[in-house]
Amino acid sequence: MSERYRKSEQLLERALRTIPLGSQTFSKSRTQYPHGVSPFFLARGEGSRVWDVDGNEYIDFVNSLAAVTLGYNDPDVNAAVAAQLRDGVILSLPHPLEVEVAEQIVAMVPCAEMVRFGKNGSDATSGAIRVARAYTGRDRVAVCGYHGWQDWFIGTTARNLGVPAAVRDLSHPFTYNDAQSLRALLERHPGEFAAVILEPMNIVPPAPGFLETVQALAREHGAVLVFDETITGFRFANGGAQERFGVTPDLATFGKGLANGYPVSAVAGRADIMKLMEEVFFSFTFGGEMLSLAASLATLRKLTREPVIETLRRRGQRILDGVGELIARHRVGDIAEICGDPVWTFLKIKPATPYSDWELKTLVLQEVFARGILMIGTHNLSYAHSDADIDRLLAVYDEVFPLLRRAVDRRELPALLRCAPLEPLFKVR
Ligand SMILES: Cc1ncc(COP(=O)(O)O)c(C=O)c1O
């Protein structure tokens, strides 16, 4: 048992007796955190910081998997939730907040004419797919990116255990920035695609004309175009990636950025399609839960009132530039790469002979966690990150990149690692 993470490790051992995987979320589970050099449980968060159960403090660049956009314990969101709590969490009929948040989303998001709420991003993406199927009377869907845990999407990945073959057969992945891969699918099954769903951007920016071509192909083939803005929504711009890139889909789905960590998601889009939600069954006991809707209204209002996105963008650009410079200075370009949009950057670790990317990534995680940075591959910024937080991140990489170089050049990875490397596993992206 490690000294620094003793309580985390004890709690994990205990958790595994009653909780399969020891976590409710794959990306928060021990599959992502090497045992012996990682925290497994956090006790609290404040601003850009979190504290693990052993009392170690971190600047958090995971930020609840990008669900927290303003920062932990945001005073405006807290005040809205506290005020709402006095009136109740859920009631027996809808609360006016549902209308207010729907109107706010319609005001902010280009494609949004009508809105329905869910809880997780998967509720929203699955609702969008069902309504697209109802609207077109077709079954097939083209997917690109990560869209959640439901059968219609996860069946297309390596983690498809338990998904019926009949469902898997209806979902077809296509390749980002390769419009030809989508065209080929649509032409192989003419008149059979209900929807084309994609993350408008994740690791790399859209090539010039890519999103426009996807839109034109969807139209030409009569499929509903859905942007999965679970991450990009309320992060890439106040109106999401669709505003940022100037391409308006038929439907869009939102989740993580909607309420600074409170559980609410949304499907939004063209009224003629969304109207079908009256017939399509999309219904949740907690769909109109009011604390999350109050949090959402406070979050969205803050986005329109304060320079949240500009600030994320400015700080993120410092990460892109600063990490790029460190990669060059320490000559680790063959092992590490920084990419993505400033508001959501990726530190990609590449295989470098004789080591795999997973083995090298394990070293990075071990070293950044030890230095008080929580980061598992992306920098998910919140408004609470300060310039000093970015300075610290860069200072940590300045120390860690030479270790990567040494590990590869001198074949010293086994000597540098204080744990077993992460297992090669399903990657969501
Ligand atoms: C782009 C995208 N779509 C959908 C989802 C699924 O959201 P949830 O895990 O809230 O169901 C995620 C979650 O990571 C996501 O990043």
Image (cartoon, rainbow, N blue to C red):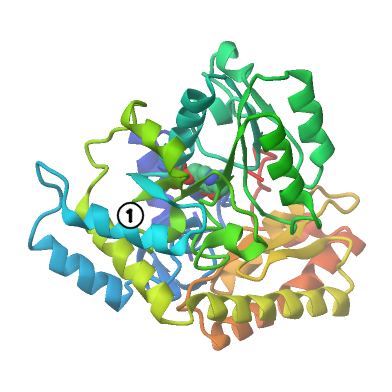
Q: Which secondary structure, mark 1?
A: helix
The number of callouts visible is 1
Alpha-carbon neighbours of circle 1 within 10 Å: few (<14), some, or many (≥20)? many
Looking at the image, residue 286 sits to the left or right of residue 417; the answer is left
At horizontal 33% and vertical 54% (from top left) the residue drawn is 102
- Residue 18 is situated, as x and y percent measured from the top left of the image, at 33, 34
- Residue 24 is situated, as x and y percent measured from the top left of the image, at 40, 42
At horizontal 45% and vertical 30% (from top left) the residue drawn is 131
- Residue 331 appears in the figure: yes
- Residue 259 appears in the figure: no
At horizontal 55% and vertical 40% (from top left) the residue drawn is 147
Residue under pointer 1: 102
At horizontal 56% and vertical 17% (from top left) the residue drawn is 167
Ligand 1 within 8 Å of disc 1? The answer is no
Name the one closer to the observer, 369 or 260: 260
Q: Is residue 32 above or below residue 55?
A: above
Looking at the image, residue 206 sits to the left or right of residue 21; the answer is right
Residue extending furthest front? 272
Name the one closer to the observer, 142 or 48: 142
Q: Is residue 11 above or below residue 186?
A: below
Amino acid found under the numbered disc labelled 1 = Ala
Name the one closer to the observer, 9 or 284: 284
- Residue 414 is situated, as x and y percent measured from the top left of the image, at 77, 54
Residue extending furthest top? 166
- Residue 410 is situated, as x and y percent measured from the top left of the image, at 90, 63
Looking at the image, residue 156 sits to the left or right of residue 68; the answer is right
Tell me the quarter of the picture where residue 42 sits.
bottom left
Tell me the quarter of the picture where residue 236 sits.
bottom right
